[in-house]
Amino acid sequence: MTELIPAKIWWTASELAEAGLPDLPGTRQNVERWIKSINLRAHPDFARKRQGRGGGWEYHWKALPSRAQRKLLSEAIAPSAAPAPARDEVWQWFEGLPEAVQDKARTRLKIIQAVEALEGQEGRYMAVDAVARMEDVSARSIWNWLSLIEGVRRDDRLPYLAPRHRAAKRKETRDEVDPDFMDWLKSDYLRLARPSFATCYRRAVRVAQSKGWAISPEHTMRRRYKEQVSRPTEVLARYGLEKLKRMFPAQVRDKTALQALEVVNADYHKFDVFVRWPGEAKPVRPQMVAFQDIYSGLILSWRLDLTANSNGVMLAAGDMIEDWGIPEHVVLDNGREFAAKLVTGGTQTRFRFKVLEDDIPGLFVALDVKVHWATPYSGQSKPIERAFRDMCDAISRDPRFEGAWTGNTIDAKPENYGNRAIPLDQFLRVVEEGIQEHNLRQGRRSEVAWGRSFREVFDESYARAPIRKATEAQRRLWLMGAKGLRGDSRSGELKFQGNQYWAAWMHELAGKRVIARFDPADLWDGLHIYSMENAYLGHAPAREKGGFLSIDEARRTQRDRAAYIKAERVAVAAHRKLKARDLGADLDAAPLPDAAPAVEAKIVRPVFEKRRGADPEAPRADLSAAQAAVVADLQTRRAKPNDQSESDIERFKRALELEAKRDAGEALAPEQERFLMMYSQTSDYRAHKKMMEDFGASYLG
């Protein structure tokens, strides 16, 4: 319900005296005496200094006697309430703000929470003053922030505390351009002849001068053109349909995607067993990444893969968090698969790479998990190595793996080495059975087990420990992961893990770096795209794959491409309002520029007096002989490359001679340079060169 307020909120003493309100004196002096008697000026909510000429004080209507307030309210008109924005709209607006603006809102919320914490003991006014001094902010600012969240749910306060200047629409301050001038310029530029923008602008200026249109500068027209015409529209109009089709992401076919508490540690282990891995021609030794609770020794999660990689670490860590919770500390091996930025972004490492300013927040850092790096080549630093030693005996030497065991060292190969390879499904079944037996085995002798199993020790402590469970937002963070991607330079399409992601709005991302959050176990769910400032941009669905012979998928792609092209055709037609013949008619009607006057020669070539007795028609003998030699040599060089009687080996020899002259520092004629450059790029030259390198100079005969 909208609160009823009087038309006038703040009153001076003179205005109160003249208003004739009940229970108030009728003169200014008596009103001032009444104000002083109740010490009204000591209340900042009800008294303030008057702004403007004359100064003085003014007082809030709520400080007046109750009968005077009722009199003012009886004359008031209820204001129309502005519709409150929806919660989703407010949070969506806040999510689109830069990180720096969001940090200001979080700082303000922290100050408000401090005021509320002190309010119960000292009162709001004293709490505001104390927090203002402690945080070095103005008390008036805190009061303003409190007014911003008045009536707002406690869990929705953060967006309302963000600086509101980001919500105000910027005032447009730019010159208008003549629409006829813009239409003529776009119609001329958006043609398959692909004229330059500068040339089209000059032609448009000629027509505009003849028709009286307003002419804007070229740089302004370039900027307006880029604002009005999208890149796909320009490509369709200037480069044709085929190039526009290439901007639409190609159909991806038949390729599947892969999937990946106090203190825990993790490491990779390579099994000493040959396994037949799908897609591999030879038997392989699989590797397992496992997370172990250090307190109890329980194996919390594990994953198998062909090689040690960060994707397997992510999947195993996700299983642990999903099944058990978020640990406080994690001890990791210093291998590259664990030091990948995808997993530990934002954490200082000693060996692999420095944390950069634009590094992407990784899984453990984002979940406030303290990462510790184990000492290199020190198995004692990782208790999980002890568990791996047990698995080498209990799992790798299982009788079901007889003939597939490789030995744990080169010198320990068994006599039946390589006789057998275990199918992957059977290997997985035995490994799962072995890890379960490892966790449930009785008689453990650790300092906390006392004869119990690892699972019993873990369950006892887990029941009373304060466990942090992953919320939906945190689950999205660790499941989606984080990896820096760059949009395709033409379409803005993103490629990741062998898949392609694209939406119609992503042309804005062409060539730009972005943050992508994704589900490694369900890459077909798409990517959520953020700017490098961590502002949300939109969702990019995965391009659906189809079989190589799938008619339905081909038809679906064709329909999508046709709709895409149709929309761009409509955009081209909207911009190109004039046809080429109309442009030509306007150019014919436009007067030609005035011809420039003929330029007279300013330099006169001097004529010198001939020597007495010399024949002007007789050429010098030495000069004529030199010219004749040059002409004969030039004709010989020009004819030689086109001489059909020259064999391949002779042409190669001639190229070698020219290369030797050039290497010796001799100058080659332009024709010789051209011949050598073109011939050295042919397959004949490369074949002869290879044969000469293999057989030496004897190859030339």
Image: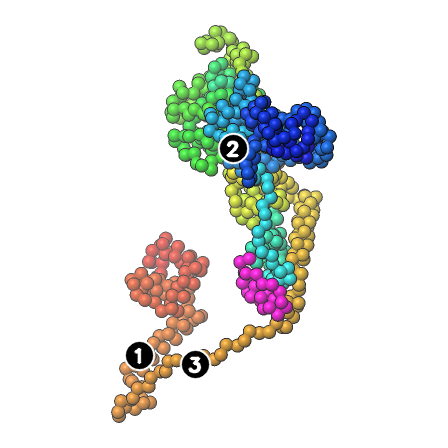
Q: What element carries label 3?
A: loop
Residue 679 in the image: above or below residue 643:
above
Q: Where is residue 602 in the image (x, y as percent from the top left)?
A: 39, 80
Of the two numbered discs 2 and 1 in the rendering, the one whose residue sits closer to the viewer: 2
Residue at 56 percent across and 45 percent down: it is 509
Q: Which of marks 3 and 2 is nearer the N terminus?
A: 2
Q: How crowded is mark 2: few (under 14 residues within 10 Å), some or many (20 or more)?
A: few
Q: Position of residue 572 (x, y in %)?
A: 65, 56
Which SS does the magenta portion mostly show? helix
Of the two numbered discs 3 and 2 in the rendering, the one whose residue sits closer to the viewer: 2
The amino acid at mark 3 is Glu
Residue at 59 percent across and 39 percent down: it is 167
Residue at 33 percent across and 84 percent down: it is 606
Q: What element carries label 1?
A: helix
Check residue 600 in the rendering and tell me which mark sits there, or answer none: 3
> In the orientation shown, which residue stands out farthest toward the left?
612
Check residue 103 in the rendering and tell me which mark sits there, or answer none: 2
Q: Inspect the magenta stretch and tell me whether residue 212 lies in it.
A: yes
First to last magenta residue range: 193-220
Quarter of the view holding residue 353: top left
Mark 3 and mark 2: Cα distance apart in space: 73 Å
Left/right of residue 226 with respect to residue 82 in the rendered view: left
Check disc 1 and report the residue beneath it.
626
